[in-house]
Image: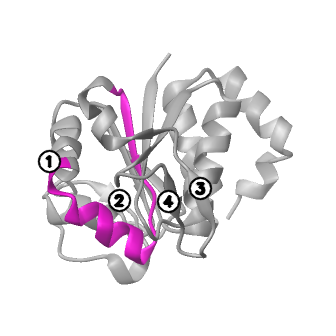
């Protein structure tokens, strides 16, 4: 089973975090939410407080197979300001492990040079001169990198993560349980 961490910073986008956690847990993925502050309770961009599973100081990002950054303007700024986590994220990516970010959060990867030569997506106003190829898609997988465009793309973003981690049969079970039909994905 793949050990996965999703990092929560004050101002994170609630749906991008919670839908991803929900879908991965439905798929049987061992995913933990990690607060980057000294408090398990983290407030989202829409002022909903969520209790994380663990504190960053009590985990080692190197022990995870998958790392996920949800977006949110303030959440992304707070994640990026946490230098220790950004260094761990970059090392994780460079080691070939699955690295995921959605909405504004792929900009963190871009600032670290992790999008060079990659196909990626993000919230359009957060695209920059990252040396990769921006795709106007809901979610993009390129090697060990998965990016999502924004809150409305969260289901497809999470599906692409699941496609890397579980069998096709399990993915179909998750989709059926959510009433997410193939015809919904024809955009």
Q: Earlier in the sequence, mark 4 or mark 1?
A: 4
Which quadrant of the rendered structure holds the C terminus?
bottom right
Which residue range is magenta in the image?
A: 64-84
Residue drawn at point x = 53 percent, y = 42 percent: 160
What residue did someone put label 1 on?
87
Q: Nearer the viewer, residue 83 or 117?
A: 83
Classify mark 3: residues with Cα within 10 Å, few (<14), some (14-19) or many (20+): some
Label located before the other in sequence (2 or 3): 3
Label 3: which residue? 50
Earlier sequence position, callout 1 versus callout 2: 1
Which of the two marks, 2 or 4, is nearer to us in this view?
A: 4
What's the distance in space between the residues labelled 2 and 3, CA to CA? Answer: 29 Å
User: On the image, numbered disc 2 is attached to which residue?
Assistant: 120
Residue 132 visible in the snapshot = no
Q: Is residue 163 left or right of residue 38?
A: right
Give the number of the disc on residue 155. none
- 80 in magenta: yes
User: Are discs 4 and 3 less than 8 Å apart at CB?
Assistant: yes
Residue 52 lies in the magenta stretch: no
């Amino acid at each position: 089973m793949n050990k996965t961490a999703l990092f929560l910073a004050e101002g994170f986008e609630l749906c991008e975090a919670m839908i991803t956690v929900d879908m991965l847990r439905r798929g049987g993925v061992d995913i933990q939410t990690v607060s980057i502050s000294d408090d398990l309770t983290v407030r989202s961009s829409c002022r909903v407080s969520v209790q994380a599973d663990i504190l960053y100081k009590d985990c080692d990002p190197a022990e995870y197979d998958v790392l996920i950054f949800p977006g949110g303007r303030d959440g992304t700024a707070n994640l990026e300001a946490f230098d220790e986590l950004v260094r761990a994220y970059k090392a994780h990516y460079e080691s070939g492990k699955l690295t995921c970010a959605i909405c504004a959060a792929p900009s963190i990867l871009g600032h670290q040079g992790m999008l060079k030569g990659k196909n990626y997506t993000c919230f359009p106003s957060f695209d920059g001169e990252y040396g990769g190829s921006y795709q106007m898609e809901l979610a993009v997988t390129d090697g060990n990198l998965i990016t999502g465009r924004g809150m409305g793309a969260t289901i497809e973003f999470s599906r692409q993560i699941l496609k890397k981690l579980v069998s096709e049969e399990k993915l179909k079970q998750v989709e059926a349980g959510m009433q997410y039909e193939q015809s919904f994905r024809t955009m």
